[in-house]
Image (cartoon, rainbow, N blue to C red):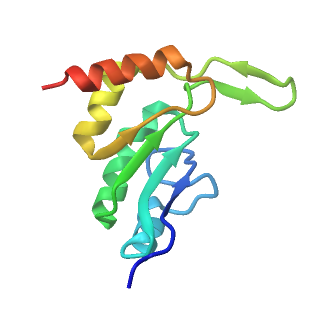
């Protein structure tokens, strides 16, 4: 009874407890528990300041591995078609260590996260005790 293909499902969130549409994260996490072929659940294109709380919300409802790849924290203004500053976030290496400590299995980045940000995350996680 082997799965022919594996994948993960990821969610963009508006705060530390809800998907962008307002659905509680724990609700979707419960739906993901035990799904055949589901390798992980993910948090993507979400402000970094919400990620640690979201990991906790997922962890309360599922044992499925968690991947996080938030955006830079900047906000995109669709009217002006420009990026605007967002809430201050800790440096990427510091944030990545906290996300792994909270239960993330993998860490990456989405919109406006640079290759140098990802390199710094990798270096911080490889050197972590």
Residue 46: image x %, image y %?
A: 55, 39
Pinpoint residue 45: horizontal percent, then vertical percent.
Answer: 58, 39
Q: Residue 67 vs residue 83: left or right?
A: left
Q: Residue at x 27, y 46 (%)?
A: 103
Task: Please state if 103 lies on the left or on the right of 24 as rendered.
Answer: left
Q: Say which quarter of the image contains residue 91.
A: top left
- Residue at the far bottom: name it: 1
Asked whether 40 or 58 is in front, the reply is 40
Depth order, front residue of 17/111: 111
Q: Which residue is drawn at 44% across and 38% down?
A: 50
Q: Which of 119 and 52 is in front in this view?
A: 119
Q: In this figure, what is the number of numbered marks?
A: 0
| Residue 34: image location, x then y, percent | 36, 76
Looking at the image, residue 1 lies above or below residue 63 = below
Q: Quadrant of the N terminus?
A: bottom left
Q: Which residue is drawn at 28% across and 32% down?
A: 98
116 up-or-down from 23: above or below: above
- Residue 23 shown left or right of residue 95 in the figure: right
Residue 39's place in the image compared with 37, above or below, is: above
- Give the quarter of the figure containing the C terminus: top left
Whether residue 91 appears in this view of the structure is no
Rendering quarter of residue 123: top left
Residue located 84% across and 25% down the image: 81
Q: In which quarter of the image is residue 60?
A: bottom left
Query: Where residue 14 appears, x then y in whole percent?
Result: 57, 45
Q: Is residue 86 visible?
A: yes
């Amino acid at each position: 009874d082997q799965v022919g293909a594996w994948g993960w499902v990821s969610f963009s969130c508006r705060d530390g407890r809800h998907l962008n549409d307002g659905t509680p994260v724990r609700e979707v996490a419960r739906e993901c528990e035990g799904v055949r072929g589901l390798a992980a659940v993910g948090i993507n294109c979400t402000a970094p300041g919400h990620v640690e709380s979201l990991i906790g919300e997922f962890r309360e409802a599922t044992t499925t591995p968690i991947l996080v790849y938030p955006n830079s924290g900047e906000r995109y203004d669709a009217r002006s078609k420009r990026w605007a500053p967002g809430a201050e976030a800790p440096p990427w290496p510091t944030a990545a260590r906290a996300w792994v400590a909270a239960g993330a299995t993998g860490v990456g980045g989405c919109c406006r996260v640079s290759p140098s940000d990802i390199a710094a995350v990798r270096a911080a996680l490889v050197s972590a005790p």
